[in-house]
Image: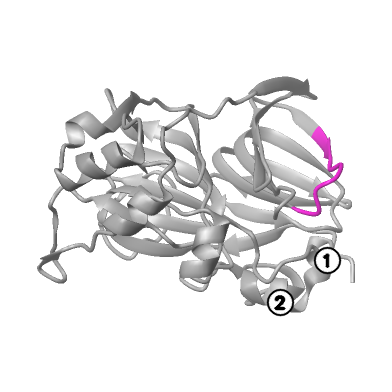
Amino acid sequence: MTVEQPLFLKPCFQEKIWGGQRLKTKFGYDIPSDHTGECWAISAHPHGPATVLNGQYRGQTLAQLWRDHRELFGNAPGDVFPLLTKILDARTELSVQVHPDDTYALKNEHELGKTECWYVIAADEDSEMIYGHHAKTRAELTELIKEGRWNDLLRHVPVKAGDFLYVPSGTIHAIGKGVMVLETQQSSDTTYRVYDFDRIDKKSGQKRELHIKQSIDVTNVPHLDPQLDITKKQQGDAVITKFVATDFFSVYKWELPSGKAAFRRQEAPYTLVSVLDGQGKIDVAGKSYPLTKGQHFILPYGVKEWILHGKLSIIASEPGIKA
């Protein structure tokens, strides 16, 4: 059956030791506590599945749709829905961590690896990320980690609202204090902690587990910044920024200061959409659907064309070749 309407989704929220309240204050979400770190906005992962809010599939999870109605996704292959969209609120810094690639993760964790990227929604003054490291060899990496020489090892980069960072698997990284990002990633929840600032988890009274061997195994050495070909084009009244196009996903920003813009999907079987700011509407197959900040939805395979109206700032993504 062809479905020609957006599939709006109810997110799932995750409490984190480093989380805060900005998912509520900025987006109006009903969060579980004042240390809520993650909004799993478009997710079929078992640790936080999103639920359809409208139409004939209302009440079903995205995982159920992927399993039972693959036609909604152009009969795309794969055992699991390949992408996961999150919003993260880092009241304090996240752990220094690294994610494995597909080969290592499937063998050792029985799920996909994790390549991801961040669009910076908001950042306090003088905010930064840990992004990469300075070790030239794996032996040096091992030595610096085991000796806890974090100032010598870790690479710090300043960030501000509107920045975009691509984080391939094997990249040591940490989102910094006071930063909020929209993250597009492979659908994986495998994280190897390298360092956690010796924090104590109040629930357990213990330091959180580190994964030193796995981290050394999977970290890319030496670190090389990926070369991005970021492009912009005018489309109707909108500016379309293409941040990245990889085997895993393509990610775009649709910025509509006012007016309207028509879209036609070319090759991707479906599109993931997150409204970061503004309000307006989307026209699909002769019907209009209101849009406002904090909404997330999928344009399924049956939706080939749509028109945006209003003032909107949107991050959209599509599955890549591997996905």
Q: Is residue 42 visible?
A: no
Q: Quadrant of residue 256?
A: top right
Residue at the image position 68 percent from the left and 67 percent from the top: 54
| Residue 263 inside the magenta-drawn segment | yes
- Magenta segment, which residues? 262-270
> Which of disc 1 and disc 2 is earlier in sequence?
2
Judged from the image, the secondary structure of the residue bearing numbered disc 2 is: helix
In the image, what residue type sits under mark 1? Asn
Residue at the image position 39 percent from the left and 57 percent from the top: 191
Quarter holding the N terminus is bottom right
Dot 2 crowding, Cα within 10 Å, few <14, some 14–19, many 20+ = some
Which of 128 and 109 lies nearest the eye of the viewer? Answer: 109
Tag of residue 75:
1
**Residue 73 location, x and y as percent?**
78, 62
Which of 254 and 207 lies nearest the eye of the viewer? Answer: 207
Q: How many marks?
A: 2
Horizontal arrangement in the rendering, residue 97 relative to residue 78 (left or right): left
Residue at the image position 81 percent from the left and 54 percent from the top: 269
Residue placed under numbered mark 2 in the picture: 67
| Residue 190 inside the magenta-drawn segment | no
**Residue 16 location, x and y as percent?**
29, 59
Q: Main secondary structure of the magenta part?
A: loop
Q: Quadrant of residue 208?
A: bottom left
Whether pointer 2 and pointer 1 mark residues with C-beta atoms closer than 8 Å, the reply is no
75 up-or-down from 193: above or below? below
